Image: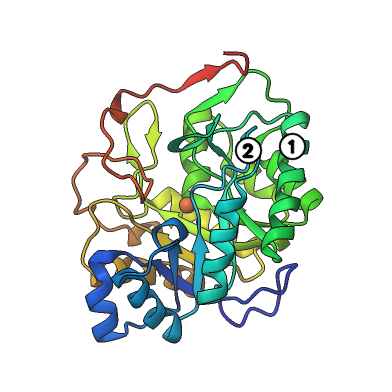
């Protein structure tokens, strides 16, 4: 929320309410300059890109604050950090001057193979130490704090000795990095793994939360898939309201990556977040979901995935 007197620990700007920059909205944005506070880009879609998309991004960046959000850093992998990727990230940052750079607390591959998915980590002291060291390396290369997001998850490791929120808090404090708190992901994982989302929020060092994500998901009865193709549900709005009450002016971003509606519809959904911060949350404000129940996984780089409805929430062994 803009003009909040409390500031986050890095004194990063409070950008207000933003949307993801997606190709289907380029023309609308360039023509109408909509009243959106800021835009988030998927970094990989613009790295080494010298075509029309970069031309659009440069025009957008002249008018709006921009944040770079990546999906390929693989901060939790046992592979060495990809220095070529980090140099590309920095090159893009030097070109468009983002307010900050974020990625996910996950691993995306191993032995140089990229799964193009955000895979869960074991929450152990060993993996915490590993991730903290790598975040410090990344921050040295990028010369700025890294902001890491809690991903949604569908499996847990038997070896977990920390909760996800304990891991996030320790990670952020030890590495001196920021947190992108995805409120929808907290809710999705809380249903999939049966924990209390309010307890999650209570365990997070809120002065390190620079940004929040809100999004829609698909409830499959026994579990939730993080599809980013529906309006935000009541439970997530309630959690968002609670999180913002504790936060230090964290910027808000509405994610919508599949079955993307017209810009005006997206903007209207974003305005609900602003309304909730100003006037509180009323359950009666819920609107009917106009979108179908078909689901896609929410990776905006690779959204055409099949078979996710068959996914079962299971326990994994780290030795498996
Ligand atoms: Fe997110």
Q: Answer with left or right where residue 135 lies relative to residue 29.
A: right
Residue 281 visible (yes or no): no
Residue 257 image-quadrant placement: bottom left
Verify CB contact (< 8 Å) between mark 1 and mark 2. Answer: yes
Q: Answer with left or right where residue 288 lies relative to residue 165.
A: left
Q: Quadrant of the N terminus?
A: bottom right
Q: Is residue 98 above or below residue 30?
A: above
Depth check: 173 or 224 in front? 173
Q: Position of residue 148 (x, y in %)?
A: 61, 52
Ligand 1 contact, mark 1 (Cβ < 8 Å): no
Depth check: 218 or 286 in front? 218
Residue 46 image-quadrant placement: bottom left
Q: Rate crowding at label 2 as few (under 14), some (14 to 19) or many (20 or more) other CA atoms within 10 Å.
A: many
Q: Position of residue 93 (x, y in %)?
A: 55, 70
Q: Rate crowding at label 1 as few (under 14), some (14 to 19) or many (20 or more) other CA atoms within 10 Å.
A: some
* Residue depicted at 61% across the width and 35% down the height: 77
Q: Position of residue 99 (x, y in %)?
A: 58, 73
Depth check: 12 or 185 in front? 12
Number of numbered discs on residues: 2
**Element type at mark 1:** helix
Q: Answer with left or right where residue 29 lies relative to residue 168.
A: left
Give the CA distance from mark 1 to mark 2. 7 Å
**Element type at mark 2:** loop
* Residue depicted at 26% across the width and 32% down the height: 306
Residue 302 is tagged as none
Residue 9 visible (yes or no): yes
Q: Answer with left or right where residue 150 lies relative to residue 146.
A: left
The residue that mark 2 highlights is 76
The residue that mark 1 highlights is 130
């Amino acid at each position: 929320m803009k003009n909040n007197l409390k500031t986050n620990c890095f004194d990063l700007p409070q950008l207000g309410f933003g949307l993801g920059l997606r190709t289907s909205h380029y023309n609308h944005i360039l023509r109408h300059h909509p009243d959106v506070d800021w835009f988030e880009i998927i970094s990989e879609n613009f790295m080494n890109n010298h075509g029309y998309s970069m031309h659009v991004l440069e025009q957008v960046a002249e008018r709006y604050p921009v944040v770079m959000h990546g999906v390929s850093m693989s901060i939790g992998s046992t592979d060495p950090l990809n220095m070529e990727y980090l140099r590309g990230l920095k090159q893009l940052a030097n070109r468009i001057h983002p307010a900050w750079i974020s990625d996910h607390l996950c691993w995306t591959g191993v032995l140089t193979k990229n799964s193009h998915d955000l895979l869960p980590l074991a929450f152990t002291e060993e993996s915490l130490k590993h991730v903290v060291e790598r975040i410090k390396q990344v921050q040295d290369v990028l010369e700025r704090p890294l902001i890491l997001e809690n991903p949604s998850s569908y499996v847990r490791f038997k070896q977990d000795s920390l909760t996800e929120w304990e891991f996030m808090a320790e990670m952020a404090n030890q590495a001196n990095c920021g947190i992108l708190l995805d409120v929808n992901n907290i809710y999705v994982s809380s249903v999939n793994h049966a924990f209390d989302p309010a307890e999650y929020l209570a365990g997070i060092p809120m002065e390190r939360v620079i940004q929040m994500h809100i999004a829609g998901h698909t409830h499959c009865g026994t579990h939730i898939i993080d599809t980013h193709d529906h309006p935000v549900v009541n439970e997530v709005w309630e959690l968002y309201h609670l999180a913002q009450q504790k936060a230090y002016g964290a910027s808000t971003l509405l994610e919508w990556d599949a079955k993307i509606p017209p810009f005006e519809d997206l903007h209207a959904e974003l305005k609900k977040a602003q309304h909730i911060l100003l006037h509180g949350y009323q359950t009666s404000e819920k609107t009917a979901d106009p979108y179908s129940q078909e689901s896609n996984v929410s990776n905006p780089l690779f959204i055409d995935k099949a078979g996710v409805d068959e996914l079962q929430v299971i326990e994994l062994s780290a030795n498996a």
